[in-house]
Amino acid sequence: MADSNTIYCGDNLEVLPKYISDESVDLIYIDPPFNSSRNYEVFWGEGQERRAFEDRFGDAMHYLEWMRPRLRELYRILKPTGSFYYHCDWHASHYVKVELDRLFGFDNYRNEIIWCYRGGGVPKKDFARKHDTIHRYSKTATYTFNVDDIRIPYSEDVLDSLPSRYDKSYRSNKVYEGYRPNVKGKHPEDWWPIQPLMPSDKRERLGYPTQKPLALLERIILAGSNPDDVVLDAFCGCGTTLEAASKFNRNWIGIDFSPTACRVMAQRLEDRLGLKEGQDFALRDMPKTPAQLRRMPHFEFENWAVVALGGIPNRVKVGDYGIDGRLYVADLPKATPSVIREGDQHIFESLDRWYPIQVKQVDSVGRPEIDNFETAMRRDKRSRGYFVAFGFTSGAIREVKRAGDDGLDIVPITVEEIVRHELAVA
């Protein structure tokens, strides 16, 4: 069994068989990428970290082929008494249900939950699409369902509509036409009117494009698990499932392919719940070798490099002239000491002072790339800049020296240098 309260960075198809034993998880919720043919580019929270990922699978069959082996792994690790929630939208919902019926069995389909909401735009020639679907399955006929933990208080309108002989305090056993309301509220239906996160939700919203409201996950976790049970989210994005599980004293396991997302989750658990990495939870398998970093998505690699230098990823990528991040002078003492070269003499100057960072996920940066970086530095009136890549050609190094003679201090930094330092201080 994997260690609980752990975030694993990696492809869940690799993480699940490596770490998670058979029938060891009580509740699984997943919100995988929908087959929506959209691209997302997003900044993360106040740190303005940027994550880009493609939600693009072509036709439904391609999407199901990608999901099928992952679903088999999730079925393997689910306890016989466990429950499984699959969150999706109209693009693939019907295809997904057929696949899940084959895996779990038609008789183990418990609910088609409709999460309905308001807000956003509306199409001119279609009805407004304002719901997602959550398919709920059990593995066997014996499963956890804590309805009393998720009952909904009766509204005043309902109470006012009852006869006067009905005890509105819920403390009598009077029956009205064969119906005795539960003291804790009404039994929830299979449609959930829970509002999505809005831009004004500053406290909860992190900027993740498909972030779900905490209230949605709280209801799922309360209904489908008990204290000390194990909850797993194999596509955990910005960590809403992990926060909800921690809040209600469940153990949890989170998996996400994005190193940026994993960092955001860790920060979220610390900021919102006061949990400490290395003490209350663990973050495992973050990329540590050049080979792993070569396989990272491009924008993930950019984020990693900029943050490793102590900088802030650039908010805008269009028209940025190749400036992928900024290293502010006030941040230099926190930056990687073996990477930031000797000679920085202006540590305490104005916060308006910053150094540009450019990142290329290539084996060899040549002279043209250095020339372009020089142009960007001169445009922004920067005297020093940092260029990160896996390697530099001899022509690039000569151009760096020539730029130095002209008063521009360009510091070439290899990925291997950054990795060596991170391993040395780990």
Image: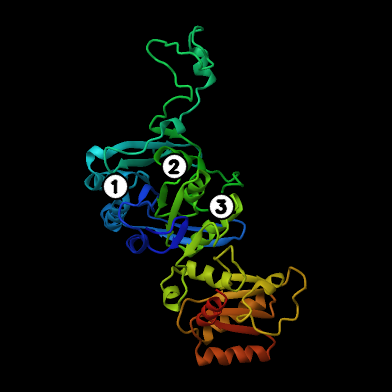
Q: Give SS at disc 2.
A: helix
Residue 231 placed where, x, y %? 42, 49
Q: Is residue 192 left or right of residue 310?
A: left
Please give the label number shown on residue 206: 3
Q: Amino acid at mark 2?
A: Ile
Query: In the rendered structure, which disc, 3 or 2, sits on the residue that comes first in sequence?
Result: 3
Query: In the rendered structure, which disc, 1 or 2, sits on the residue that comes first in sequence?
Result: 1
Q: Which residue is mark 2?
A: 221
Please give the label number shown on residue 96: 1
Residue 9 placed where, x, y %? 44, 63
Quadrant where the C terminus lies?
bottom right
Q: Amino acid at mark 1?
A: Val
Q: Give SS at disc 3.
A: loop
**Residue positioned 38% across, 52% down in the render:** 32
Q: CA distance from mark 3 to mark 2?
A: 21 Å
Q: Is residue 64 left or right of residue 232?
A: left
Q: Do we see residue 324 in this rendering?
A: no
Q: Residues within 10 Å of mark 1 (few under 14, many from 20)?
A: some
Residue 165 placed where, x, y %? 49, 7
Seen from this angle, which residue lies furthest top?
A: 165
Query: In the rendered structure, which disc, 3 or 1, sits on the residue that comes first in sequence?
Result: 1
